[in-house]
Image (tube, coloured by chain):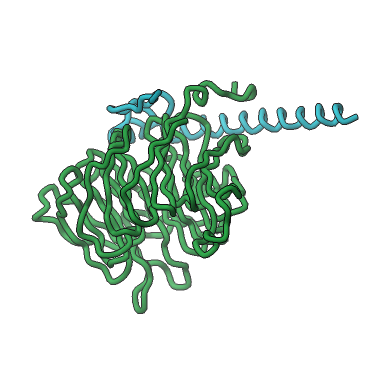
Amino acid sequence: MRPILLNGHTRSLTKIKYNREGDLLFSVSKDHTPTVWYSHNGERLGTYEGHNGTCWDIDVNGSTTRVLTGSGDNTCRLWEALTGKELHVFETRSAVRSVAFAFGDEEAIFVTDATMGNKSTIHFIKIAENPQEQQGPYKTIIVNDGESKFSIARWGYLNKTIVAGHDDGTISIYDAETGKLLRKAKDHTSTIQDLQFSTDLSYFITASKDTNSFIYDYDTLKILKRYPTERPVNSAAISPLKEHIILGGGQDAMSVTTTSVTAGKFEVRFFHKIFQEEIGRVKGHFGPINTLAFHPSGKSFASGGEDGYIRIHHLDPDYFTFKYDEEE
Amino acid sequence: EDSLLKTKVSREIVERRKKLYKEWKEYRAQCQEKYKKDKALRYELSGYESDGEGRKVEKDVEYVE
């Protein structure tokens, strides 16, 4: 496996996301500059200039015409994907932690942190075809009293629900129409760092600071699979092609300088999704892995690290032919 | 004695895998049944024509020698 190193960010990566076709890779980092890259060769296509703070999340719509970014500068910004033109700035009262386009591209959500006097909130926006007519949020879901703040939110099955992860490890599912809490589960004991769906949206994987990753059934919030590790898990992704998942993490930033790279904490770990057995590790990053994404074809994956690098790994042909005897 | 133990352990692993695989296939069959009616809409919204293996993307990744 020969990785491609994408060197352009000057600070830690926070999120990477492929577009639907998989030809482009979008990234955000603590350096304030969202960036788009060609995924096949790692060439930088361009940047999105405007944020003044750490960018926490990025999403691209299905037709790769719009990009949404959320930042610690108390804004969520809408961009023209292929020109980098800023189309709209949604100003907020606190940092924007998470952003997501709805399936079909007509709507989006962004999540704001709790601050003094403001509770953590999921904001709903309608994406206007004409940017001049873009409006602000038309609806919100505010975290209930006594509940921990939202750390991530994603659209659920066919845009009917919002699946949210909380700072205390809770997973909540809300009705996207009414904002009513439909079901919740508290299996993790620390922040939900990442939440990625299977391709048919019937289950999703979580990554938590509590060192575990779980696969939940979307409909029942029952845990289907468990992947315990020894270190905080920052990101988890489900292969669209094989029965595999990948986990990335490391440890808290304060311990990074005291840990040797060879200690084996900064590797992408492959697990067999069904058997829950570790099947391989991919080395490379010089610090914790903050974000992972599978290419939509499942033939490669990308990782973004605390070291400021993105690594694109094209999987070897052997990978696609290997199967356990029991997988028949 | 060691090889007997190894055989026993490996047999247990195989049995465990078989059980997990069977359970997962049953779960997936239930999912497909449950979400069958929405399949066309789901594909339309996602822009893909398949859920997994064989899913085509416009600019597929080529293996770089």
Q: x, y percentage for residue A70?
A: 30, 58
Q: Residue at x 71, y 28 (%)?
A: B14
Q: Nearer the viewer, residue A79 or A175?
A: A79
Figure disc tally: 0
Question: The C terminus of chain A appears in which quarter of the rendering?
Answer: top right
- Quarter of the image for residue A301 reads top left
**Where does residue B10 sit, x and y in percent of width and height?**
76, 29
Q: Is residue A35 left or right of residue A299?
A: left
Above or below: residue A117 compared with residue A29: below
In the rendered image, the vertical position of residue A229 relative to residue A325, given as above or below? below
Residue A187 in view of the camera: no
Residue A213 visible in rendering: yes
- Is A137 left or right of A156, judged from the image as shown? left
The structure residue drawn at horizontal position 16% and vertical position 54%, both measured from the top left corner, is A86
For image coordinates 13% across by 47% down, the residue present is: A129
Q: Position of residue A10 (x, y in %)?
A: 33, 55
Is A74 in front, or is A201? Answer: A74
Nearer the observer, B14 or A291: A291
Which quadrant of the view contains residue A96? Answer: bottom left
Residue A103, image x and y in percent?
30, 43
Q: Is residue A268 above or below residue A324?
A: below
* Residue extending farthest bottom: A117
Kindly indicate which chain is depicted in cyan in the rendered structure: B
| A131 sits to left or right of A9 | left
Chain A image colour: green
